[in-house]
Image: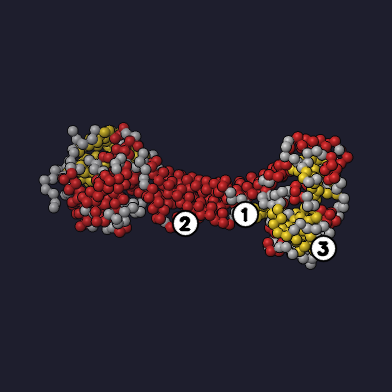
C-alpha cells in the first residue's frame, strides 16, 4: 500500500488557522490536565512512601492508634525503656536512634490579634530526630532551643499554612498557646510529609499542648542487618509489655496505610481527569468531523486516483496526530514550567506535584491518543460515501 | 476485440422503497484509441457509465471488461490499484488539492508507482509540458485561472500514462477560450498518444472534438454515434 506524502497532511493543517488553534489548544489542555492529575497522584504517593529511611524506621505508638499518630498518647518514659530494652536499635557514639515525638495539629496565628487560625502540622522533637530522620536537613538557621519559644519550619510549611514564603523567614514569628514563637531555622525534607511541618522542642510542645509526661510515639531506627528480625523483636517486646500499652508498626507501613486510604482520592482525581479528557476528545472529534467533512470531494478524488481508504485514513490521522503532538509538547512545556513542584495542601501537610518522566510520558500519550482517536472516526465517516457520490459533494 | 466491452451493463440504486436504475442493460464496445462523447439529459446514466468504466463504481449486473480485466470481479483495493495504472480522470471542477502546488498535484498519482524519484520528476515534468502548464509548476491552485487548473488536472490524469482517460464535463466550468484549449489538449492526447477518451458533456460544441458521440436516455443508448471525419482546429 502506497501512502500519501506527509507534507500533504502537514500542509492541510494550514487550511484553517482556527481549527489548527483549536486542535493545538485542545491537545495542550488535555495534556496539562493529565499532567496535573498524574503529577498530583505521583506527588502524593511519593510523599507518603518515598524516603529510603522509612524502610528502617519503626514507630512505637499507643495501642489502638495505629491509624493516626495524632491520636496516640503514650508515657514519655517509654522512650528510655525502648532504648534500653530493645536489641537492634541503631546506635552511634553511644546515642540510641530513638526519637520521642509529639505529632499534633495546632491552630496558629500570624499575630496574636489576628482572628484567622491556620492549622499547622506540629512535631515536637529532640535533636535525635535528625538522626532518625536523616532526609531532614537544616538548610538555614539552627535547631530550636527548648524553653526559648523557638521553632523551625519545613520547606512547604508556608503552603500548608497558606502564607507567603517570606512570612516564614528566619526571625518571623508564629503565635500559638498565647505566645509568639520565633522561627530560628528552616529545614528541607523533600518528597516527605515532614517538609510541610513545624518542628519545635518536645518539652515546649508538651507544655503548649498541656500533655506533660506523655508523647505521641517513639520512632526508632534499626540496624541495617536483618531488619526483619529486628522488627520481630520489637514487636515481641511490645506484645510482652502489655503494661506499656504500645504497639510497633514499620514507618513504611504506617504511611502506606495512609496512602491506601488516600487511594480513593487518587481514583476520583484520575476518573475526573479521564472524564474531562473525554470531553476534550469529543471536542476534538467535533473539530475533525467539520474539517474532514469539508474535504469529502477531495478524498473522493484521491480514491479515484488509486489511493486506498486505508492510506487516506492514515494520512488524515497523521494530520490530527501531528497537531495533537505539537499541542502535547506545548502542554508538556507549560506543565513543566507551571506545575512541576507546585505545592498542594492536604490533610497531612503538603506535597509538590511531580512532573517526572512517567508523568510526562502519560501526558504525551494522553495528547497523542486524543489526536489519534479524535481523527479516526471522522476520517472513516469521510470515506463512508461511495467514490462517485463523494465526487459530487460540495 | 474492443478495449472496453459492456454487456447488459446495469447499475441500480435503492432509495427508500424505490429502485433507481441509471443504467439498464447497456451494451457498448469502445475500440482502442477512440474519443467518445457521451451526451444525454440529466439522469440518463452517462456519468454512471463513465464511473463504471473508470472503476470507481461497480455494476449491479452485467459485465464490464476493460483491456481484458473484468472490473465487476475486482475487490475494492484491486480496483484502486487498477485505477492507478489504467485510468486518468478529468473532473469538471478540476479537484486539485489546494495545499499542493501544480507540480505536487500532478505528482500525486505518481506516488502510487514504484519508480525512482528522478523518474517521477521526469514524468511529472513531461506531463506538465504536454499540458502546456510547466511554467506554473510552482503555483498553487488559487494562483491559477480555471483553464490553467484544468490543464493541471489533465496533466495529473496523463502523468501515469494510462491507456484510458475519462472526463466528466471537462469544460463545464470554463469559458469558451479555456474550453477550446482544454479540448484541443484532449484531442492531441487522443491523436498523438493514442489515448482512449470517454467524455461526458452537455455541450454539443464540445462533442465536435470527439470521434464519436453517443446519446443515452434512461440508462440505454438511444442513438448510435456518427464517426467524425473532420474535427475543429
- Whether the residues at callouts 3 and 2 have beta carbons within 8 Å, the answer is no
Q: CA distance from mark 1 to mark 3?
A: 33 Å
Task: Answer with mark 3 or mark 2, whichever residue precedes in sequence.
Answer: 2
Residue A223: name its quadrant: top right
Q: In this view of the protein, can residue B233 be seen by the observer?
A: yes
- Whether the residues at callouts 1 and 3 have beta carbons within 8 Å, the answer is no
> On what subunit does the disc labeled 2 rest?
A
Q: Is residue A156 above or below residue A57?
A: below
Label 2 Cα neighbours within 10 Å, binned few <14 / some 14-19 / many ≥20: some
Q: Nearer the viewer, mark 3 or mark 2?
A: 3
Label 3 Cα neighbours within 10 Å, binned few <14 / some 14-19 / many ≥20: some
Q: Which residue is mark 2?
A: A21
- SS label for mark 1: loop
The outermost residue toward the left is B229
Residue at x 62%, y 52% (from the top left corner): A353
Q: Which residue is mark 1?
A: A341
Q: Is residue B44 above or below residue A16?
A: above
Q: Is residue A256 above or below residue B75?
A: below
The percent coordinates of residue A13 (x first, y second) are 41, 53
Amino acid at each position: 500500500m502506497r501512502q500519501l506524502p506527509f507534507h500533504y497532511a502537514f500542509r492541510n493543517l494550514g487550511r484553517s488557522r482556527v481549527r489548527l488553534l483549536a486542535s493545538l489548544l485542545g491537545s495542550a489542555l488535555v495534556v496539562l490536565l493529565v499532567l496535573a492529575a498524574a503529577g498530583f497522584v505521583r506527588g502524593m504517593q511519593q510523599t507518603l512512601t518515598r524516603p529510603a529511611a522509612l524502610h528502617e524506621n519503626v514507630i512505637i505508638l499507643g495501642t489502638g492508634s495505629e491509624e493516626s499518630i495524632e491520636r496516640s498518647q503514650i508515657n514519655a518514659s517509654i522512650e528510655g525503656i525502648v532504648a534500653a530494652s530493645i536489641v537492634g536499635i541503631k546506635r552511634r557514639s553511644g546515642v540510641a536512634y530513638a526519637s520521642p515525638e509529639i505529632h499534633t495539629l495546632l491552630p496558629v496565628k500570624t499575630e496574636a490579634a489576628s482572628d484567622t487560625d491556620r492549622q499547622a502540622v506540629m512535631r515536637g522533637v529532640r535533636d535525635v530526630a535528625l538522626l532518625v530522620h536523616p532526609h531532614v536537613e537544616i538548610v538555614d538557621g539552627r535547631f530550636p532551643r527548648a524553653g526559648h519559644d523557638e521553632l523551625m519550619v519545613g520547606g512547604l510549611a508556608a503552603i500548608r499554612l497558606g502564607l507567603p514564603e517570606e512570612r516564614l523567614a528566619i526571625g518571623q514569628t508564629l503565635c500559638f498557646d498565647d505566645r509568639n514563637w520565633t522561627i530560628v531555622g528552616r529545614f528541607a525534607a523533600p518528597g516527605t510529609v515532614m517538609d510541610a511541618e513545624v518542628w519545635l522542642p518536645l518539652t515546649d510542645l508538651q507544655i503548649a499542648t498541656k500533655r506533660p509526661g506523655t508523647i505521641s510515639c517513639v520512632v526508632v531506627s534499626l540496624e541495617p542487618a536483618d531488619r526483619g528480625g529486628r522488627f520481630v523483636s520489637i514487636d515481641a517486646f511490645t506484645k510482652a509489655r502489655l503494661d506499656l500499652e504500645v504497639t510497633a508498626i514499620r514507618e513504611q507501613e504506617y504511611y502506606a496505610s495512609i496512602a491506601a486510604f488516600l487511594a480513593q482520592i487518587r481514583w476520583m482525581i484520575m476518573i475526573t481527569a479521564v472524564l474531562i479528557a473525554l470531553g476534550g476528545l469529543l471536542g476534538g472529534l467535533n473539530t475533525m468531523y467539520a474539517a474532514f467533512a469539508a474535504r469529502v470531494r477531495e478524498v473522493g478524488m484521491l480514491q479515484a486516483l488509486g489511493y486506498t481508504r486505508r492510506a487516506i485514513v492514515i494520512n488524515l490521522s497523521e494530520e490530527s496526530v501531528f497537531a495533537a503532538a505539537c499541542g502535547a509538547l506545548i502542554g508538556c512545556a507549560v506543565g513543566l514550567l507551571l506545575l512541576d513542584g507546585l505545592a498542594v495542601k492536604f490533610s497531612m501537610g503538603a506535597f509538590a506535584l511531580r512532573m517526572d518522566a512517567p508523568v510526562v510520558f502519560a501526558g504525551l500519550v494522553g495528547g497523542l491518543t486524543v489526536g489519534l482517536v479524535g481523527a479516526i472516526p471522522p476520517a472513516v465517516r469521510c470515506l463512508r460515501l461511495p467514490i462517485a457520490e463523494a465526487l459530487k459533494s460540495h | 476485440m474492443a478495449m472496453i466491452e459492456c454487456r447488459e451493463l446495469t447499475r441500480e440504486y435503492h432509495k427508500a422503497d424505490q429502485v433507481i436504475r441509471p443504467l439498464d442493460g447497456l451494451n457498448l464496445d469502445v475500440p482502442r484509441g477512440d474519443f467518445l462523447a457521451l451526451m444525454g439529459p440529466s439522469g440518463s446514466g452517462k456519468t454512471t457509465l463513465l464511473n463504471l468504466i473508470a472503476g470507481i463504481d461497480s455494476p449491479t449486473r452485467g459485465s464490464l471488461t476493460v483491456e481484458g480485466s473484468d472490473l465487476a470481479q475486482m475487490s475494492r483495493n484491486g480496483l484502486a490499484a487498477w485505477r492507478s495504472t489504467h485510468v486518468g480522470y478529468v473532473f469538471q471542477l478540476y479537484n486539485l488539492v489546494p495545499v499542493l502546488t501544480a507540480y505536487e498535484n500532478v505528482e500525486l498519482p505518481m506516488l502510487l508507482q514504484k519508480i525512482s524519484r528522478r523518474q517521477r520528476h521526469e514524468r511529472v515534468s513531461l506531463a506538465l509540458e504536454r499540458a502546456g502548464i510547466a511554467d506554473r509548476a510552482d503555483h498553487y491552485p488559487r494562483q491559477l485561472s480555471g483553464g490553467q487548473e484544468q490543464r493541471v488536472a489533465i496533466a495529473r490524469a496523463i502523468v501515469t500514462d494510462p491507456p484510458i482517460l475519462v472526463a466528466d464535463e471537462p469544460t463545464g466550468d470554463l469559458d469558451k477560450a479555456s474550453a477550446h484549449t482544454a479540448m484541443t489538449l484532449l484531442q492531441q492526447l487522443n491523436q498523438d498518444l493514442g489515448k482512449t477518451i470517454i467524455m461526458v458533456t452537455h455541450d454539443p460544441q464540445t462533442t465536435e472534438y470527439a470521434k464519436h458521440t453517443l446519446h443515452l436516455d434512461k440508462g440505454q443508448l438511444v442513438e448510435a454515434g456518427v464517426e467524425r471525419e473532420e474535427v475543429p482546429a
